[in-house]
């Protein structure tokens, strides 16, 4: 569906399509343990978050130079634009690259090269969100934040991702405080596989502006009331939730109940190369599985721009919202 929308939950490393992975492997002299892009694609069957993350981190071996990161981001922006994305807030995982000897400057400046040309090339405005890996230590997160300081003018927010269960938000209080002091917005994955308690912590300890996923919030009525009262945006990723078996099937997805509860829900693709679709594909799949009516689809698209970090560019937010209102199905 090409209704204008913002994508607010998108891991750039999760946009690495098998064909691009093989092209970058060849360019960089990296050998992948798969014979072809098709064989690689057949490996995309996951039991849970960890089984996905194992493959996701392994494939990053092909990303080595600024040009690689620029090519990856440019390919994503072209696909996103074709599916109606007008604004994209893009996660990246610096520790997954610095651990392999790729400097953080290579990652940020490579991504920035593609993002800087995005409005002209693709008609998509962008933000960059730097995520800390929650299965690494608080000290590693702080070290990463310090290493990123020369690049903070390119970064709008910090986030928290990777294996959730057993890695509560509270561990990262200090680095989130440092990010806030540096004027950055804050988000965190919470309530994807982890319990509602992690969503409370992300809100009350890390001071996040949005919750990524948050689907398990529905198990805690008090939390639902809090999220509704404060209109905390939730960046929900329907195809991801099914592929990682957080939700049994799309027609059992809690999204309609979340909307009924008055939550500020948005629809996003998470890792589209792995989970079967980009932002518009997620809208299509949801509409088909749950028989969403046009008003609901328009509400979801409006929510995405309401929740975007477009502070300082309110004219853009207003323009995008007007585009949603004018959209003819
Ligand atoms: N959850 C946590 N970490 C991630 C994800 C996700 O869905 N995708 C990429 N890193
Ligand atoms: Zn995610």
Image: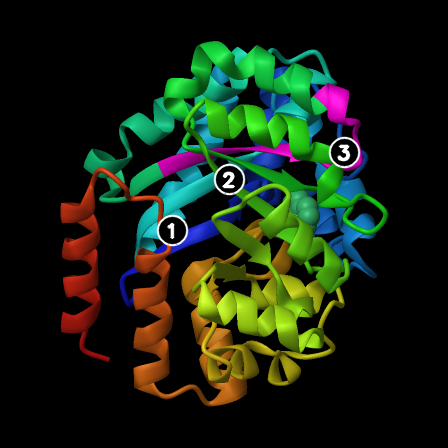
**Which residue is at the front of the view, 256 or 282?**
256
Q: Which residues are magenta?
A: 127-140
Mark 3 surroundings within 10 Å by alpha-carbon count, few (fewer than 14), some (14 through 19), many (20 or more): few
CB-based contact (under 8 Å), mark 3 and mark 1: no
Question: Label 1: few (<14), some or many (≥20) within 10 Å?
Answer: many
Q: CA distance from mark 3 to mark 1?
A: 24 Å
Examine the rendered structure and indicate whether residue 306 appears above or below residue 296.
above
The residue labelled by disc 3 is 58
Question: Which residue occupies the foreground of this view, 246 or 158?
Answer: 158
Instruction: Work out whether residue 230 or residue 122 is closer to the camera in this orientation and state it.
Output: 230
Taking the spot 80% from the left edge, 41% from the top edge, the residue there is 54
Task: Say which residue label 1 marks.
Answer: 80
Residue 15's image quarter?
top right
Tell me which residue sits at (69%, 27%) in the image. Answer: 96
Circle 2 is placed at which residue position?
186
For image coordinates 41% across by 43% down, the residue present is 89
Report x, y in % for residue 18: 62, 43
- Residue drawn at point x = 36 percent, y = 22 percent: 113
Classify mark 2: helix, strand or loop: strand
Q: SS for tag 3?
A: helix
- Image quadrant in which the C terminus is located: bottom left
| Residue 93 seen anywhere in this rendered image of the structure | no
Q: Quadrant of the N terminus?
A: bottom left
Mark 1 element type: helix
């Amino acid at each position: 569906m090409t209704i204008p929308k913002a994508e607010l939950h998108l891991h750039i490393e999760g946009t690495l399509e098998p064909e691009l992975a093989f092209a970058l492997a060849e360019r960089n002299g990296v050998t992948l343990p798969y014979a072809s892009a098709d064989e690689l694609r057949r490996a995309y069957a996951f039991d849970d978050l960890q089984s996905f993350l194992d493959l996701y981190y392994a494939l990053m071996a092909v990303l080595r130079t600024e040009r690689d990161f620029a090519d990856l981001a440019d390919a994503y922006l072209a696909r996103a634009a074709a599916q109606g994305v007008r604004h994209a807030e893009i996660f990246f995982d610096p520790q997954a690259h610095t651990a392999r000897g790729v400097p953080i400057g290579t990652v940020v400046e490579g991504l920035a090269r593609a993002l800087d040309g995005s409005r002209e090339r693709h008609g998509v405005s962008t933000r960059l969100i730097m995520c800390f890996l929650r299965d690494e230590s608080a000290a590693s997160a702080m070290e990463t934040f310090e290493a990123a300081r020369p690049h903070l003018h390119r970064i709008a927010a910090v986030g928290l991702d990777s294996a959730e269960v057993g890695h509560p938000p509270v561990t990262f209080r200090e680095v989130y405080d440092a990010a806030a002091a540096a004027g950055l917005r804050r988000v965190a994955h919470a309530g994807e596989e982890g319990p509602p308690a992690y969503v409370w912590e992300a809100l009350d300890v890390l001071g996040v502006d949005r919750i990524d996923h948050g689907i398990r919030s529905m198990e805690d009525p008090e939390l639902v009331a809090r999220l509704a009262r404060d209109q905390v945006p939730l960046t929900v990723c329907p195809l991801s939730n099914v592929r990682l078996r957080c939700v049994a099937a799309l027609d059992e997805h809690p999204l309609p109940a979340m909307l009924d509860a008055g939550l500020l829900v948005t629809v996003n693709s998470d890792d589209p190369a792995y989970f079967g679709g980009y932002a518009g594909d997620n809208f299509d799949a949801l509409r088909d599985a749950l028989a969403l009516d046009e008003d609901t689809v328009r509400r979801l698209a409006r929510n995405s721009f309401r929740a975007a970090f477009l502070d300082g560019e309110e004219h853009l937010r207003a323009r995008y919202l007007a585009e949603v209102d004018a959209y003819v199905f």
